[in-house]
Image: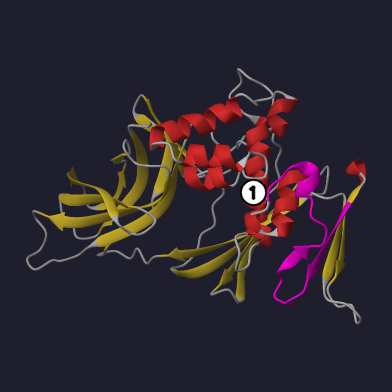
Amino acid sequence: LLVAVYEEGVRLITEKVWSGKVEVDSIQEVRSKRPGEIVHKSIHLQPGRYRFNIRIRDIETDRSNASRLRITVPDYAPGQWKVSDVMILKGLEDQGWKKVITPNIGASISDVSDSFFVFLRLYNGLGVDSAILLLEVADHAAVPVLAETLLVSVRAGENSLLPAVRSRGLSVGEFTLRVRLTPVRSAPEGTTELAETERTFSVRWIGAPMEVTDIDAAIDQMQYIVDRELLEEMKSLPAEQKRERWIGYWSHRDPSPGTERNELMEEYYSRVAYAMRQFGHYTLGWKTDMGMVYIIFGAPSNVEHHPFEIDSKPYEVWTYYELNRQFVFVDATGFGDYRLQSPIWDVYQTRPR
């Protein structure tokens, strides 16, 4: 694990390298997409804005995965009223005199959960003995859908807070949790301090892939494998029946019924998600010709890139050796809109968009 920290994205502040071993009990756990281990490391930084470059490398295969993260470290100097970031929790357990928390790394909760806990720290430099805690949940359009106000006891200095957020009734999708803390009671006269922070999270269905957050979109994305008449019928159903019909379709095609995972459904929607990331421009990635071919056939065995040919427009050639198929995409406009040159739906019974 390599972590490089840059100040304002320019100057390298520090670089840390850690090595370790992850052990699992079976090959199924190796192939599972679910997180198998949580690794906790600490880097001490001064208040400011930073960019983290994170790279994890598998020593045995030499494969690596990289990501970037921007972080703001607030100034928690004495005498101030400040709050930390919010951590969504997967579990909270009492072990005698202490509480053990398990972070929810993906910040994804089930749509049947009554509530979930969050963890945050309040830095009480005012010395007050209580505070008003406001928990507000807003949908993707920033419209508040849930709000709750609590009176909490606090002490001077650092406080660990574990409020519960009532999530039952939230629809599937993306949300923002806003937390506001206002000092009360013995605060000095005229004090109007307000500490606030926010965190995004998602609500998903049990048994559905993490990529699925909108039932109508999930049904639309099945058009490459399902007749249009059936799709229109599913979309016309009431919300709960629509969901049951969608789940039923995939359940009947589950290659390992009786297990928690539906590998076929996971694979299909992981391809949709990949197409959204890689092939989108002014059209959604899964609706492009490249997205369609990727969703139906998966990753090609070989890709030939020809972006700067003198006597032709930019084009790509995808080859599937095991299928003895080849697809040619041409960018006729020069704006990255690669169009398939040979229609495939007449052979594979897929439908045009």
Observer-nearest residue: 152 or 223? 223
Residue 345 vertical position relative to residue 247 in the rendered view, above or below? below
Q: Which residues are magenta?
A: 326-351
Observer-nearest residue: 89 or 219? 219
Left or right: residue 14 compared with residue 317? left
Observer-nearest residue: 147 or 239? 239
Point out residue 138 in the picture as x, y percentages from the top left corner.
Answer: 32, 53
Point out residue 189 in the picture as x, y percentages from the top left corner.
Answer: 6, 66
Residue 84 visible: no
Point out residue 173 in the picture as x, y percentages from the top left corner.
Answer: 43, 47
Residue at 55 percent of width and 73 percent of height: 7
* Within-10-Å neighbours for mark 1: few <14, some 14–19, many 20+: many
Residue 194 vertical position relative to residue 19 in the rendered view, above or below? below
Residue at 71 percent of width and 52 percent of height: 292
Amino acid type, callout 1: Val
Residue annotated with mark 1: 272
* Magenta residue check for 146: no
